[in-house]
């Protein structure tokens, strides 16, 4: 979905696309099995993601990874940073690539 703002909305600096994604430590097919399994058998139609990322970055506490999870994990991997200039109007193009969009709240 692309939402275009008003045609008269001028901006000075285009910061480009900002990717919003979720991250699951579990393997894809394990998540699909959980989603497809009946609720009375332990299924979950909306398993929570392990983290949410902005441009592929976000801090994570690797001590919370489930036992047996072999996914490479880096504590405090860093966050995405943006540079804004005082007195200038900036354009950010938000691209929401999360699996479960209703869980994300974006405030402007």
Image (cartoon, helix red, strand yellow):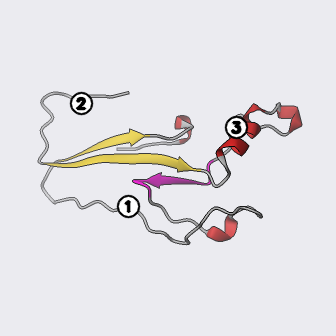
Q: Tell me, for residue 80, which label it has, or none.
A: 1
Vertical side of 75 occupied by 37: above or below: above
Asked whether the viewer can see residue 70, the reply is: yes
Residue 35 in percent (x, y) is at 72, 35
Residue displayed at 75% across by 32% down:
36
The residue singled out by tag 2 in the image is 5
- Rendered view: 38 above or below 47: above
Could one spot residue 44 in this view of the protein? no
Q: Which of 67 and 15 lies nearest the eye of the viewer? A: 67
Magenta span includes 52? yes
Image coordinates for residue 70, horizontal then vertical, percent: 68, 63
Secondary structure type for disc 1: loop
Residue lying at the far right in this picture: please name it.
40
Q: Residue at x 76, y 63 (%)?
A: 68
For image coordinates 65% across by 44% down, the residue present is 28
State the image quarter where residue 86 is shown. Answer: bottom left
For marks 3 and 2, give the CA distance: 36 Å
Residues under labels 1 and 2: Cα distance?
24 Å
The answer to which of marks 3 and 2 sits earlier in the sequence is: 2
| Vertical arrangement, residue 79 with respect to residue 48, above or below | below
Which segment is the magenta one? Answer: 49-56
Quadrant containing the C terminus in the rendered view: top left
Query: Where's the N terminus, which quadrant?
Result: top left
- Crowding at mark 3 (Cα within 10 Å: few <14, some 14-19, many 20+): some
Give 10 or 65, whichever is nearer the viewer.
65
Q: Residues within 10 Å of mark 2 (few under 14, many from 20)?
A: few
The image quadrant that residue 46 belongs to is: top right
Number of other residues with Cα within 10 Å of mark 1, as a class: few under 14, some 14 to 19, many 20 or more: few
Q: Residue 90: horizontal and vertical position, in percent?
A: 20, 48
Label placed on residue 32: 3
């Amino acid at each position: 979905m692309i939402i275009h703002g008003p045609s008269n909305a001028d901006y000075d600096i285009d910061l480009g696309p900002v990717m919003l994604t979720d991250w699951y430590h579990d393997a894809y097919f394990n998540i699909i099995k959980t989603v497809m399994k009946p609720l009375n058998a332990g299924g979950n139609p909306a398993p929570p993601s392990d983290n949410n990322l902005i441009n592929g970055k976000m801090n994570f506490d690797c001590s919370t990874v489930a036992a047996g999870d072999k996914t490479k994990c880096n504590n405090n991997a860093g966050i995405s940073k943006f540079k804004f200039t005082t007195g200038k109007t900036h354009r950010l193009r938000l691209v929401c690539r999360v699996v479960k969009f209703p869980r994300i709240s974006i405030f402007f």
